[in-house]
């Protein structure tokens, strides 16, 4: 959020609604939490807080509205992975906008393994495993792989061949151009 005036007006409204006064350090904390999001996203979050919260909202209430609950994030990530598996397959290297997906897929055996072996019958079980792992991995800070190598890249690497890697980006602005 960039508009500090709008932020302060919305916070004052929430405070008035809850007969509450908050300190300047606490106000600054809320500001820092909302700073990475757009003004429009924050306005929508304030509206939802005003409409749904019975008590003074905690920072987690804003984050759940802005980012979704962990389970929601995991399901959205799975849908992105499943679409990529079906449209791209295991041969190409891929990079998702959400780096947590890379770590989860690596734990599940890697991109080539997941994409090559998943059958329609296995989808629901893979989804459950993915979502469970996503919730655990996303709640921890850590380093995630930059991308997921596909079968072509891995085979060329093992054979010592020079290989100009091409990584298909999934979920980026140019998603449609790369995936279709």
Image (cartoon, helix red, strand yellow):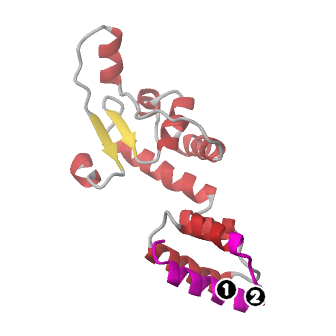
Where residue 80 appears, as percent x and y from the top left, is 43, 50
Residue 123 place in picture, x, y as percent: 51, 43
Q: Nearer the viewer, residue 89 or 77?
A: 77
> Residue 85 at x, y = what percent?
39, 40
Q: Main secondary structure of the magenta part?
A: helix
Q: Quadrant of residue 94?
A: top left
| Disc marking residue 4 | none
The residue pinned by badge 1 equals 14
Part of the protein shown in magenta? 1-26
Residue name at image x 46 percent, y 47 percent = 98
Q: Pointer 1 and pointer 2: residues touching (CB < 8 Å)?
A: yes
Residue 65 colored magenta?
A: no
| Alpha-carbon span between mark 1 and mark 2 | 6 Å
- Left/right placement of residue 12 relative to residue 149 reads right
Disc 1 packing (10 Å; few <14; some 14–19; many ≥20): many
Res. 7 image quadrant: bottom right
Q: Which residue is mark 2?
A: 18
* Residue count near mark 2 (Cα–Cα under 10 Å), binned few <14, some 14–19, many ≥20: some
Q: Is residue 17 magenta?
A: yes
| Secondary element type, mark 2 | loop
Above or below, 139 against 109 in this view is below
Quarter-wise, where is residue 50 in the image? bottom right
Give the residue drawn at x 29%, y 52%: 175
Q: Is residue 37 above or below residue 149?
A: below
Q: Nearer the viewer, residue 64 or 42?
A: 42
Judge whether 51 appears above or below 150 on screen: below
Q: Identify the residue at image location x=66%, y=74%.
A: 27
The residue tagged with tag 1: helix, strand or loop? helix
Q: Front-most of 21 and 53?
A: 21
Q: Is residue 62 above or below residue 54?
A: above
Residue plotted at (48% across, 28% down): 110
Name the residue at the front extreme.
24
């Amino acid at each position: 959020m960039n508009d500090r005036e709008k932020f302060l007006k919305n916070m004052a409204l929430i405070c008035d609604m809850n007969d509450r006064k908050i300190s300047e350090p606490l106000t600054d904390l809320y500001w820092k939490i909302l700073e990475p999001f757009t003004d429009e996203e924050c306005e929508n979050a304030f509206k939802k807080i005003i409409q749904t919260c019975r008590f003074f909202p905690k920072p987690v209430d804003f984050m759940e509205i802005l980012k979704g609950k962990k389970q929601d994030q995991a399901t959205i990530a799975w849908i992105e992975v499943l679409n990529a598996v079906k449209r791209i397959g295991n041969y190409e290297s891929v990079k998702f906008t959400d780096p947590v997906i890379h770590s989860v897929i690596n734990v599940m055996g890697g991109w080539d393994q997941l994409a090559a072996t998943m059958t329609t019958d296995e989808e629901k079980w893979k989804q459950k495993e993915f979502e469970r792992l996503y919730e655990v991995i996303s709640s921890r800070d850590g380093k995630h792989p930059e991308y997921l190598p596909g079968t072509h890249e891995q085979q060329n690497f093992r054979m010592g061949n020079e290989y100009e890697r091409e990584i298909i980006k999934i979920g980026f602005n140019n998603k449609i151009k790369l995936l279709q």
